[in-house]
Amino acid sequence: MRRVAQAGNLRFRCLILARHCDTHRHTSQPPDRALNQPKHHCISRARRGEQLKKMAGATFLPTVQAPALLGARGVAASPSVSSPARRHPHIQVCCKGNVEGIEAAGHEERLRFRRRDFIGGCVGTAIGLELIEGSTKFTGVATAADLIERRQRSEFQSSIKDTLYTAIKAKPELVPSLLTLALNDAITYDKATKTGGANGSIRLEISRPENSGLSAALDLLIEAKKEIDSKSKGGPISFADLIQFAAQSALKRSFLDAAIAKCGGNEEKGRTLYSAYGSNGQWGLFDKTFGRTDAQEADPEGRVPDWSKASVQEMKDRFVAVGLGPRQLAVMSAFLGPDQAATEEQLIADPDCRPWVEKYQRSRETVSRTDYEVDLITTLTKLSSLGQKINYEAYTYPKPKIDLGKLKL
């Protein structure tokens, strides 16, 4: 009777444990505490299936079948776990059917987990692609239009530079006047009233004393403008842009002439030297500042000194007034009159300008002339943007529409 009672008690425990294993996958609780598993809710369903199998094998698998089943899964039975077969070796309890059911349940859970993840991932990807497509319909059009406008402006700017290069090459003696013309047009800027600047107003101020001797340079640009406008598809170039780009072309010409002089007058070698060591790649920001608007009235008088008669202090005061200083004054010595050497001799007497004048003189003696040319380009770029709000759509034009009905395929 005692053995029968023990057997019945054992059978009852097995049924309770099997029921627990069958219903475990429908709950969010962790496996039996006998496994000493941590109680948390982050265990994946696949891992729960594995734990169910371990629990089944460790607690009520028979002594003969358990090692085979566990060995197939690579899990060794722990000797510290007490099983019914060890306590009652004469009783054979077979729970193989339950184990297979548990394995099937775990496999089903893993499949269900993977299926849900796969479907959810596909749905999320589809929604994401719809959002991306919807958001890029307009940005794609905007980007394409922007690229077209950039190309149009770039082509027009190349045409301007070609025309100015040819015009200046024909009259190289006007290079100093073109530089002074650009300086005098831009340095009228007044920070307090936000007026003046590189606005092309010098064409209306050419008769003023400070602009004496600049008429020939302006006439050269007026003739060049006619040719440039005849090739433009996006409207005429403004005098404000034309004057500053003429200064750029004049500077490039002076840089190239210096390189040719270092090569003993050999133009081919000079061009090679300038291409290898020159500062031609430093004009990026200047080229982007393209789209200035012309003033329709002359700027107020008294804002520009007569450089040939002004003292160094007056020159410094004017440069400081527009946000520059002695360094920029020294590097722009070529803009202050036809004789750069005479201007530098005047500036070098000033203690504020002296170190900068000497620095740029030493730089011009080197092969690359880097310090001088780069600082001069930087200063002209800042000067040429004074008082201007650049229209980055200037000189663009609508592309003609193509009538697909007239195309012959």
Image (cartoon, helix red, strand yellow):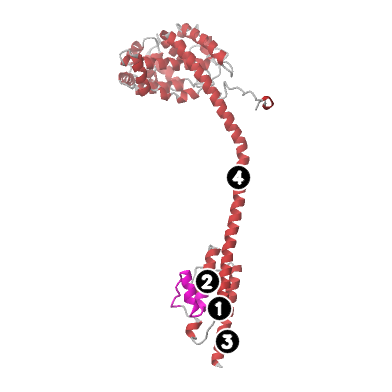
Element at badge 3?
helix
Please say if the residues under marks 2 and 3 sit with CB atoms less than 8 Å apart. Answer: no
- Between disc 3 and disc 4, whose residue precedes? 3
Q: Quadrant of the N terminus?
A: bottom right
Say which residue appears at 56% left-offset and 85% top-offset.
9
- Between disc 1 and disc 3, whose residue precedes? 3
Report the span colored magenta: 51-80
- Between disc 2 and disc 3, whose residue precedes? 3
Which quadrant of the view contains residue 22?
A: bottom right
State how many labels appear.
4
Can residue 314 be seen in the rendering of this structure?
no
Q: Mark 3 points at which residue?
A: 8
Q: What's the magenta bit mostly, secondary-structure-wise?
A: helix
Picture coordinates of residue 85 (x, y %)?
49, 83
Q: Name the residue under label 2.
A: 53
The mark found on residue 95 in the picture is 1
Element at badge 2?
helix
Between residue 386 and residue 229, name the one nearer to us: 229
Say which residue appears at 38% left-offset and 20% top-offset.
326
- Between disc 1 and disc 2, whose residue precedes? 2
- Name the amino acid type tagged 1: Cys
Picture coordinates of residue 119 (x, y %)?
61, 55
Q: Name the residue under label 4.
A: 129
Between residue 91 and residue 345, name the one nearer to us: 91
Of badges 1 and 2, nearer the viewer stands 1
- Between disc 2 and disc 4, whose residue precedes? 2
Label 3 crowding class (10 Å Cα cut-off): few <14, some 14-19, many 20+?
A: few
Q: Is residue 194 above or below residue 84?
A: above
Q: Disc 2 to disc 3, how far (Cα)?
A: 24 Å
